[in-house]
Image (cartoon, helix red, strand yellow):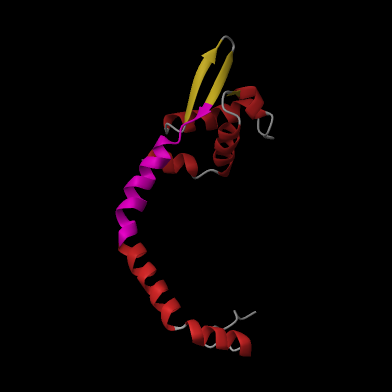
Amino acid sequence: MDNVFRALASASRRRMLDLIKDAPGCSVNDLAGFFDESRINVMKHLAVLEQAGLVISEKEGRMRRLWFNAVPIQMITDRWMSEYSHLWASPLTKLKYHIESNNKGEEDERREQGDLQGIHPRPN
């Protein structure tokens, strides 16, 4: 999991993942054309992405084809989001419905009057 976070920490690598996701099976040369970095630097970034399991590459003759693998990201989502979402999702939903049902009339009246009590603009 640390390898995935490390790989995603770089803006260049995140952009590479987006490009690979949008063009499955693209070549390293195709990908390198989107960056001002040398092909060697692109290859180093790809090595980090492959080590994290985010990119799958396959050699085809002299060409290396690239595919995005979302499984490591999904594993992080399952581990962190799913496990803890119940702690905040249900109470926030209940609060939302409570506020909407109790303040419907008051909210409409405030809108008509332009009164936004409790809401303060950010200081400049």
Classify residue 63 by image quadrant.
Answer: top right
| Quadrant where the C terminus is found in the figure | bottom right
Residue 68 point in image, percent of width and height = 50, 31
Residue 89 point in image, percent of width and height = 36, 63
Residue 4 point in image, percent of width and height = 42, 39
Relative to residue 21, is residue 40 depicted above or below? above
The residue located at (38%, 47%) in the rendering is 77
**Residue 15 located left or right of residue 94:** right
| Quadrant where the N terminus is found in the figure | top left
The residue located at (42%, 72%) in the rendering is 96
Relative to residue 55, is residue 114 depicted above or below? below
What is the total number of numbered labels drawn onto the structure image? 0
Relative to residue 46, is residue 103 depicted above or below? below
- Is residue 43 visible in this depiction of the protein? yes
| Residue in front for this viewpoint, 35 or 85 | 85
Q: Is residue 37 magenta?
A: no
| Residue in front for this viewpoint, 18 or 36 | 18
Residue 46 point in image, percent of width and height = 53, 29
Instruction: Please identify the residue farthest to the top as the structure is shown.
Output: 61
The residue located at (56%, 18%) in the rendering is 64
Classify residue 30 by image quadrant.
Answer: top right
The residue located at (33%, 65%) in the rendering is 90
- Is residue 118 visible in this depiction of the protein? no
**Residue 48 located left or right of residue 23:** left
Judged by its main secondary structure, the magenta piece is helix
Q: Which residues are magenta?
A: 67-86
